[in-house]
Image (tube, helix red, strand yellow):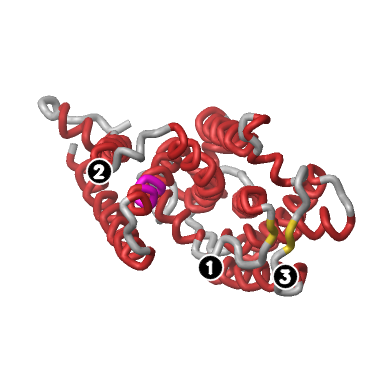
Amino acid sequence: MTKLKKGNPIKHFLIEYNTYIIFLVLLIVCTILSPDFFTAMNLRNLALQQSAPVIIAIGMLFVILTGGIDLSVGSLMAFGSSFAAVLIMNYGIHFVPAILIAMCAALLLGMFTGVLVAYAKMQGFVASLAMMTIARGVAFILTQGRPIRVDEGTLDLLVNRNFHFPIIIISVIIVIIFFLIQKFTAYGRIVIAVGSNSTAVQLAGIRVKRYIVSVYAISAILASLGGVYIAARASTGSATIGMGQELDAIAAVVIGGASLAGGRGFVFRTVIGALVLALIGNIMNLMAVPSYPQDVIRGFIIIAAVLLQVLTSKQEQTV
């Protein structure tokens, strides 16, 4: 850990916890701007809405930790929701194994992207861009271009109040699991090391390519599960789900303090980054701000987050 000069505790605190400070300030601002913000109904809806973006951002984090990027997560959301809906409605498969089968299929697609990156030496941007097109196309083929309405008592149970909103519980468990993986396992440390210096890791006898393939597989699994979440809330599987979600996931990771060059990033901070975007969208909806200005504001937030990351990195080098 970098040692800091004495006499700068406030400066160190602001650098170390900038993501949390932004979140707390934003939380206070939202509470002041709208009396409807800090209500049980709004917070519950916010939690339901963000269950998918949070886990998708975690998958994106692990890819970015290796120095890669995954632009296919939005399309894999559509693939996961469409595949699960088809299995349930067209083949009469119980929704739990249907979800697991859809996740396994997404796993294969993610592994294919990882193989292109690790073994075929394609840039992650290019490989995942190709997969973005492939997965979305497969989703349209599966659904024949139309939304598939799923029966009650299937996917909707994931957002059922009587079961204490399972998607929120599952998402919290996923966050905890990946926090523990990153913090306390050799796998988590090696993923970070690959992004910091893959050559050194390879010279140490570690099979770097396998780890690269694995992070794309993780991202695909979580993206497909996120798509199922959306389908559960709408009771509909659709090939149009997840459009633009890859940008939100990248923004959440960056706001959480991760480096797009790889080697630095944190699970909990990524979660906070996703919640920062959620708070901004939520308060603008409560204040009836039109959707197009929301996109503009979101873009400026991403720019500010990157600038904050650059500033923080420079400050860390001087303390």
Give the residue displayed 61% in from the left and 52% down from the top. Answer: 230
Give the residue displayed 36% in from the left and 68% down from the top. Answer: 292
Q: CA distance from mark 2 to mark 1?
A: 44 Å
Q: Element type at marker 3?
A: helix
Amino acid type for the residue under numbered disc 3:
Val
Give the extent of the magenta segment: 278-282
Give the residue displayed 64% in from the left and 66% down from the top. Answer: 116
Amino acid type for the residue under numbered disc 2:
Leu
Q: Element type at marker 1?
A: loop
Residue 194 painted magenta: no
Q: Which residue is mark 3?
A: 138
Image coordinates for residue 86, horizontal then vertical, percent? 80, 60
Q: Which residue is mark 1?
A: 123
Q: Quadrant of the C terminus?
A: top left
Viewer-closest of 205 and 295: 295
Image coordinates for residue 159, horizontal then vertical, percent? 64, 40
Q: Element type at marker 2?
A: helix
- Closer to the chain start, of discs 3 and 1, is 1
